[in-house]
Image (cartoon, rainbow, N blue to C red):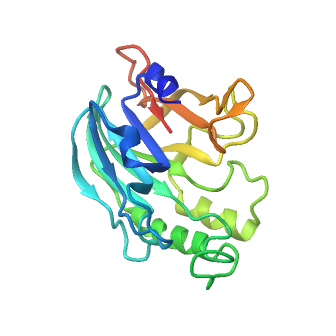
Amino acid sequence: MRRRIDALAPDILCVTEGHLDYIDGAGYAIAADADYGYAPKPGRRKIMLWSRRPWRAVDTLGHGGLPGGRFVAGTTDTEIGPLRVFGLCIPWMHAHVATGRRDRAAWQDHLGYIAALAPLLARRRRWPTVLIGDFNQTQPRTRAPLRVYEPLMDALDGFAFATTGTPPGAERPAIDHVGHDGRLETRACGAIDRRDGGRPLSDHYGVWADLAIRGRRPRRRKSPLAL
């Protein structure tokens, strides 16, 4: 899987539910806090971001209402200019329902994350902004109830998804996404095969997106964002 990611030569990489050593090497990595509400495992993080260039203004809190260990943000320089990147790992529908603390109803942590995310995304930022990570919902809606889907759409007002529907090369609609604000546009997107022949490498497939400043002619070859 790393070889497939390397072949894309991404400017920015997001790894969800992975280990810190997965993105060791050339470049710069930032990660969410280690405590995400379950028993900690050394080196494991819910969300990590990597860039070819250094990060600045790194934030692992975002908003006090966000569940811990599921958010990281930073600003990095890319071939299209500085980008503010939010790494998101929205809890799945059964977070802490039958496992973990066992003190939640279905979708409770998911909706709590969205409620805390909404005012954070509503702030105007200096640089074009990218959202990348595990949203645990498809775009457009397939299985999530409307009471869960509509709050996410409200929170993401002003943002668009590069990875709607079933991205080229994928086998089903994505729940891992690349999104962006109106200062950016999607030039292309696709999926990273999650199988090696008949052998599964992951229970998620990766996605990638080639973004550009809206209205600006691209100056170089594609160098996408990968998840």
Residue 134 drawn at (x, y percent)? 55, 52
Q: Quadrant of residue 60?
A: bottom left
For image coordinates 74% across by 61% down, the residue present is 144
Residue 22 drawn at (x, y percent)? 41, 40
Say if 26 sits above or below 56 in the image.
above
Residue 133 drawn at (x, y percent)? 51, 49
Say if 41 sits above or below 65 in the image.
above
**Farthest-out residue, front:** 42
Judge whether residue 163 can be spotted in this image. Answer: yes
Depth order, front residue of 189/172? 172
For image coordinates 53% across by 30% down, the residue present is 1
In the picture, measured across the screen, residue 39 lies left or right of residue 177, that is left
Say if 107 sits above or below 129 in the image.
below
Depth order, front residue of 63/170? 170
In the picture, measured across the screen, residue 176 lies left or right of residue 169, that is left
Judge whether residue 181 can be spotted in this image. Answer: no
For image coordinates 63% across by 82% down, the residue present is 102
Depth order, front residue of 201/132? 201
Residue 17 drawn at (x, y percent)? 51, 52
For image coordinates 43% across by 77% down, the residue present is 65
Q: Quadrant of residue 136?
A: bottom right
Q: How many marks?
A: 0
